[in-house]
Amino acid sequence: MLYSRAELKSIFTGSGIIAQKLFLENPELYYTMRAEAVAQGILGPSAIGTPAPYTTGKPQKSYSEREMFLRAKYSLEELKTFFRSNNTGSKENPSTLFRTNPAEYAERREAAVSYGLLPSTPSTPQRTPQARTTEPQPGSGETFELDPRICKELSLPEGFKVNSEGYYRAIQAVKNAAASKAVAAEKARLEQEAAANKDNDVQPE
């Protein structure tokens, strides 16, 4: 035996958070330890060739990579405030943002459609179709619950289940959204600095 029974149980039983972390940081070691856990009877074999169900009750909704990215970038509350804003002239007003930054407006609208806040219309930007990556596929193996913190980041219901591929893509969506928000924040900061410097350069006569 490569690993003790106690060591394997500490990783693969319980909430599954440790196993998720191991899979993300070292997939090769994860699969090695999982195989050992199966050999020792701690885990059952993966459902190879059979889609693993998410739940025994009502099937949960699945999301594409694009949807997960947008849900991580824009929260439901943020979008409710934005689309109900009547602050004419403000950047946070839909009509103003549509004129000044149509790309960002389109992203917000896509996110709102994903949340069910707005209906999908022919004018909704259509991206390249993506597979519902949190949907288990034949041979995808077991599913497990996402860490509650990741569910919160993606505005998913607590207890949302994914397979190993869905977990990787969920983590990637959170990272991509964080990077996108950081870039936007830095751009806004530079614009503010440029505006302030311009004002300082204007000397009263």
Image (cartoon, rainbow, N blue to C red):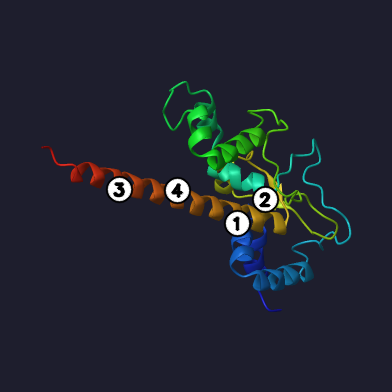
Expressed as whole percent of the image width and height from the top left, the position of residue 84 reads 52, 23
Q: Secondary structure at mark 1?
A: helix
Which amino acid does the dot numbered 2 rest on?
Glu
Report which residue position mark 3 lands on: 194
Quote the CA–CA distance across marks 2 and 4: 20 Å
Q: Earlier in the sequence, mark 1 or mark 4?
A: 1
Numbered disc in front, either 2 or 4: 4
Quote the CA–CA distance across marks 3 and 4: 15 Å
Report which residue position mark 4 lands on: 184
The reply to whether the C-beta atoms of the residues labelled 2 and 4 are less than 8 Å apart is: no
Expressed as whole percent of the image width and height from the top left, the position of residue 88 reads 44, 23
State whether residue 177 appears in this view: yes
Numbered disc in front, either 2 or 3: 3
State whether residue 151 appears in this view: no
Numbered disc in front, either 3 or 1: 3
The reply to whether the C-beta atoms of the residues labelled 1 and 2 are less than 8 Å apart is: yes
Report which residue position mark 1 lands on: 172
The reply to whether the C-beta atoms of the residues labelled 2 and 3 are less than 8 Å apart is: no
Q: Earlier in the sequence, mark 1 or mark 2?
A: 2
Which amino acid does the dot numbered 1 rest on?
Gln
Quote the CA–CA distance across marks 3 and 1: 33 Å
| Left or right: 157 as drawn, with respect to 205 | right
Question: Image quarter for residue 137?
Answer: bottom right
Work out whether 29 lies above or below 187: below
Report which residue position mark 2 lands on: 65
Question: Image quarter for residue 1?
Answer: bottom right
Q: Nearer the viewer, residue 180 or 18?
A: 180
If the image is split into quadrants, where does the C terminus sit? top left
Quote the CA–CA distance across marks 1 and 4: 18 Å
Which amino acid does the dot numbered 3 rest on?
Ala
Numbered disc in front, either 1 or 4: 4
